[in-house]
Image (cartoon, rainbow, N blue to C red):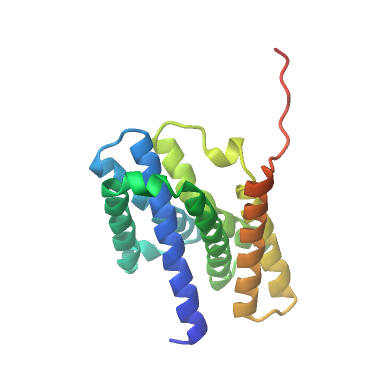
Amino acid sequence: MATADIVILALDLFGTMIFAITGAVKAIERRLDLLGVLVLACAVGAGGGMVRDCIIGATPVAALVNEIYLLICIASGFIVFFCYRKISQTQNIIRYADAIGLGVFTAIGAAKAVEYNLDFTGIVLSGVLTAIGGGVIRDIMVCSIPTVLKSDFYATAALIGGILYYLLMKAGVPFFALFVIVLFVVTGLRILAIQYKLRLPKVRLRK
């Protein structure tokens, strides 16, 4: 396996772990039991990729072909369940790590769409679905309006990343450089949104 492939795989597994941790934390905040924690960890860590693969016809889905993804999600769920008090004190670190995961998953999702010969719309949506799909599944499972639809500059960062991936690909940028650029841009946008509390505009309803 080439060095670039190893780096991308490592980043993918890192993103899976961080997303799984956020899912497990949400489960504990909603007072779910151990099974609930593990289910939400898997839903957030691997759910986006599974939804993407089903939609673009990449079956069996990657998370079921390579067991390491679900094993990482399950391990992360156990760690959060038994170490929640310590982990809850590192919420800011998790948020910034989650920004890296967002960038990684956006780039990986877009790249997967290219493998299946999809064009602009498919590439962009594949990147977005991979990045936010798990979080949407998580919120639906705990009976909440998906966070990406009501607050934070989250899905928008992934959308911009997907568009950037397509444009750079058409410009002939080599794959690894393309991957890294999209990763840094999406991560950077998300971090800026966290620091400066960036939000998309909403309609102000009369009281």
Residue 44 as seen in the image, left or right of residue 115: left
Residue 34: percent from left, percent from top? 24, 43
Residue extending furthest bottom?
A: 2
Q: Is residue 183 visible?
A: yes
Q: Quadrant of residue 73?
A: bottom left
Residue 192 or 145: which is nearer the viewer? 192
Residue 164: percent from left, percent from top? 70, 64
Residue 132: percent from left, percent from top? 53, 50
Number of disc labels: 0
Residue 133: percent from left, percent from top? 49, 50
Residue at 72% of width from left, 80% of height from top? 172
Residue 194 or 16: which is nearer the viewer? 194
Residue at 67% of width from left, 42% of height from top? 197
Residue 113 as seen in the image, left or right of residue 34: right
Q: Quadrant of residue 18?
A: bottom left
Residue at 73% of width from left, 15% of height from top? 206
Q: Is residue 14 above or below residue 145?
A: below
Q: Quadrant of the N terminus?
A: bottom left
Residue at 32% of width from left, 33% of height from top? 31
Residue 14 or 117: which is nearer the viewer? 14
Q: Quadrant of the C terminus?
A: top right
Q: Is residue 119 visible?
A: no
Q: Is residue 206 above or below residue 17?
A: above
Residue 173 or 64: which is nearer the viewer? 173
Residue 151 as seen in the image, left or right of residue 203: left
